[in-house]
Image (cartoon, coloured by chain):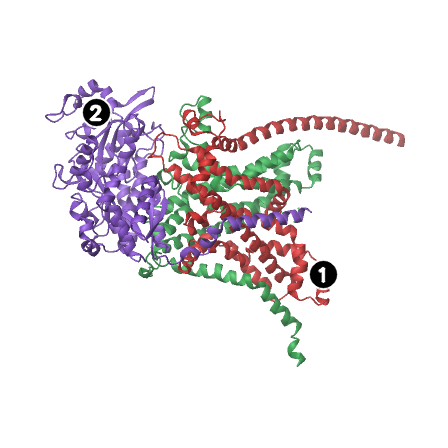
Amino acid sequence: MEENIVIEENTVQAQEDLSKMDRNQKAKKRSKWNKIIAYIVLIVCSCIMILPLLILLCTSLKPYEELVENPTAIFPKQITFEAFATVFNENPYFVYLSNTVFITVVNVIACCFTSAFVAYGFVRFRVKGSGFIFGAFLSGMLIPGQVLTIPMFEVYKSLGWINTFFPFIVPCWFGGGIFNVFLQRQFIRGIPSSLFEAAEIDGCNEMEIFFRIVMRLVAPVMITIAIFTFMNSWNDLYGPLLYLEDPDLWTLAKGIYMIYKAEMGQMGSSGGSILPWNIISAANVFAIIPIIVLYFIAQRFFIEGISTTGLKE
Amino acid sequence: MKKRLFLVLLCLVFAFGALSGCRGLTKGFGGGKEENTNEISVLIDNKDKTFFEAMIKEFEEEHAPYTVNAIWTAGDDIQSTQAQKIATGTAPDVIVGGDMYTEVYRRNLYDLTELIERDAEEVAIDDIVPGIMENLKDSEGRTVFMPRFFNISLLYYNKALFDADKDALLKAGITPAPEGTPEDKLHYPHENWTIEDYFKAGGVLTKSKNDVYSQWGSSTVGGWWGEWLIHLRQAGSDFMNDEGYVTFNTDEAKAAMQIWFDKAYGNEELGRPKISVAPGQADLGGFQSGKTAMEYGGHTASWARFDQIEGLEWGVTVLPTGLERRDGAEFSIEGYGIYKESKNVEGAWEFIKFMTGTEGIQKGVDAGFLAIRESAYESIEDAEKKEKTALAMEAIDPNGKYGTYAMTLPKYEYFSELANGIAEKWISLIIANDSSRVSIDEACSRIEKECNDYIELNYK
Amino acid sequence: MQQKIFLKRSTRKTIWFYIFILPSILGFLAFVVYPVGRSLYLSFTDMQLTRPDEMKWVGLKNYLALFSGKDPFFWQALKNTFIYAVCNIVGTLALGLLSAMLLNVRVKGQNIFRTIFYVPSLLPAVATAIMFRWVFDPTNGIINTILRAIGISNPPIWLEGASTALLTLIIISLYAFGGKMIIFLTGLNGINRSYYEAAEIDGAGYWYKFVKITLPLLSPIIFYNTIMGTIGALQVFTEGFVVSGAGPGNSTLFYVLRLYNLAYQEPYRLGQASAMAWVLFVIIGAITAVYFIFSKYFVFYENEGK
């Protein structure tokens, strides 16, 4: 009796093994096909994604005559930098760039520092009502920017801050953005409080604790915040549109936009039906390059950063 | 190591930004605003950079210690940028404007009447072509602008293209040219044309094969600087009535819009061929490319440009009579005024006198701007240019041959908001080439309703 | 004497707390509380920046004007923005999810593909907008050139046609799906493999695995990103502003664009603009509330019971 059962079990086991092998093989084949199809789709999609950028680059390298002659061709027959030369000569492009760098760097520094500063306060001190205060701050995030910008525009005008950098570099020192404070808070919470207490016992006051200990430890979060602040500041067009009038003060975003508008405005009034897209593209290329470079340097942080912000669970 | 490298990089970047943006930095902190009461700021169209740079240099030499801070702006943006600067407290000393802007800038302009009287000899008001100065007064009778040049809608035609089809044109049933026209000019557009003649000629001159067009009979210009207002007025009506409200749901307006539509799509019933480009079709470069035979309305500022184009032989005549009358050609004057709260009124006034005085206008004419002073007109050497200028001057003279042919834009401060913001949208939908097209009836009634609602909401 | 120097520890702590919080408090008061109050007030006036002395209280006039149709732009702007937002969110989430799943198939060079898909979402909106303006040019752009080459003789005129302009902007906005893709990639990685293996043993096919395992487990991520995406998409500005302004027939007039024109261009009607801003606030709030209410049915958290 038992032998039968054992044999049956063995047979059943053998059958299972066989079908598992079968399945494995099928799975392997399927996965190989999967990969090939995926590869093909990925390559096609990549081409689609790259195409506009490629055209941008190629157009910026074409001489104007080629553009008029054969506007639909992609690759330039003759590579020239005349478009870039025009962009730089006729516009204070360098100034745009440096203005943007200045504003962005100040913003990044301010946000990183201030958010850590404030977050430290929230984490370290269990004052009654601090949760409520934090919640209040957080609720400020829900308000659409438009509601806030209109009165501030009024204020800036009466302060005489229009056409200066102040609307850009002042607000970020006051808290550096609630979301950043939130991120910092999450992170600082992870620092064992024994560290702080030990320092306190050693005679450090809170400021010293903050500067010596916390600032050293928040590097990862800082980088994430730095990256996002950088992106926001660099890409911002709304602010410059509102607050910067003098061409000497424009940022890159407004600079490219005005170059684009200036060239487009030639439409009714200049000869030829092709706009100088090579000049417009050249200006554009320069706005794009820094971001791409930054990405390649700090890839890991971009990905980590956006994952943590996107995964609210 | 990497961290330190990063920090070093950061410092370098920051230093770069700060150093090279020094000029921007001082300004960026409100620095450059030291009271320079000898500086005159003014917005200038960067299209005319060469001309103005030369003029500014001369002005600064002759009228030291005054200096000019030219704010180069794209032509289309001058008005919006100027309005923005006034609103945000950084108004220029000299305000660019003209007849249409006497109401728009009503609160911001300095009364020039006394200054003109004071410097009457220099200003030489009587030298200015008749029909101009009365249009530069605001509703309280104060003169607020000094004129630099004017624009009058005319019919432009490409002589070469007309010559090429001379026979076909003469056989097209067009109203004959006035008595005494030389033989080789019989087929050209002339002052006795009607709007139907315009269509007929346009039809002859529009060439296509298999729906691909190689030549257009006429250009089409949208927007309020364009044609629809002319058609409307020539039909006997106007955009705004005396109470400041809009009238557009009228037969005249619909007939005017019909002309606008027929140009792009033709009209079998009324016997009008398609003569102009519809949205989505290649416009072949407009009148200046030599592939469009006529330009309806146009702008006198383009005369200089046309002259510079090799092989473009062009002529002008007054616009053809419309459905009811010939009156209605757009007449506008561009000039300079002074900002009411300018800190440098005297300097601004010197600049204005320089640019709009006899010499300034003379130089302007040499550079291609239309003569707004008789003296400048007299000095024109080129016979053809002189003839064209004479035509333009005649056209705007209310006591001249064409009477009230020239009409300025409605003098309401909200005209531009209505025309540009509301009417423009519906008018462009009339000739839309896809499913978004609206019927003329609907467009007209919508325009009237929306404009009047807007006026009610904001101005009453 | 010494008692005065050594404050109670808790008081000291409280003082330090407020010192550290100070920047945020000031910022909150100056940049949140004040603007909210002021803009609410302004929305009941006819304030114009250029004529501040002529300001007067008008009550609900601004709001009524918006809703009753006296303002000819409001409803169209709202409609345009809604269409854009819906298409954008659905599109970017779908593309993000699909591409994340594709990348998950562990082909070689995964990093390169990831870069290619992600970087476009980092570029300044101005730059991509201008770039696509050329790409979609009806006569000379690459899109229509390709279409003509494959035989479509009358390709759509994209940004110049009132019926196609909005569609074009939506397509352009999909270019930035990369951000969502990264989020989904991380999310997919977080799904326990054992779920899939268990399903495979039961003989599950692709579709089943997707609908019963992937989607539910990703639902919190999808939920959060839908909310954030909606809030962002409803405030779209740059794409519309740069590429086409209000567009032919005002077809690309977005809500925030209309607000910008109203508030920051002649004649600077801050009163009406404030009313528009508050309406937007309420709309966003309402939609978020609706999302939360419906989240019960669509969002599954791993910690909950089966």
Chain letter tied to purple: B
Q: Residues within 10 Å of mark 2 (few under 14, many from 20)?
A: many
Q: Say what secondary structure mark 1 lies in.
A: helix
Q: Residue at x 36, y 36 (%)?
A: A266
Estimate the x, y position of residue C110 in percent, counting from the top left: 64, 34
Q: Depth check: give the residue in front, B331 or C109.
A: B331
Chain letter tied to red: A
Mark identifier at residue C109: none
Q: Which residue is mark 2?
A: B200
Estimate the x, y position of residue B155 in percent, counting from the top left: 22, 32
Q: Depth check: give the residue in front, B133 or B69.
A: B69
Chain letter tied to green: C
Q: Is residue B203 above or below residue A105?
A: above
Q: Are marks 2 and 1 in contact (CB under 8 Å)?
A: no
Q: Which residue is mark 1?
A: A195
Q: Depth check: give the residue in front, A174 or C80.
A: A174
- Give the residue type at disc 2: Lys
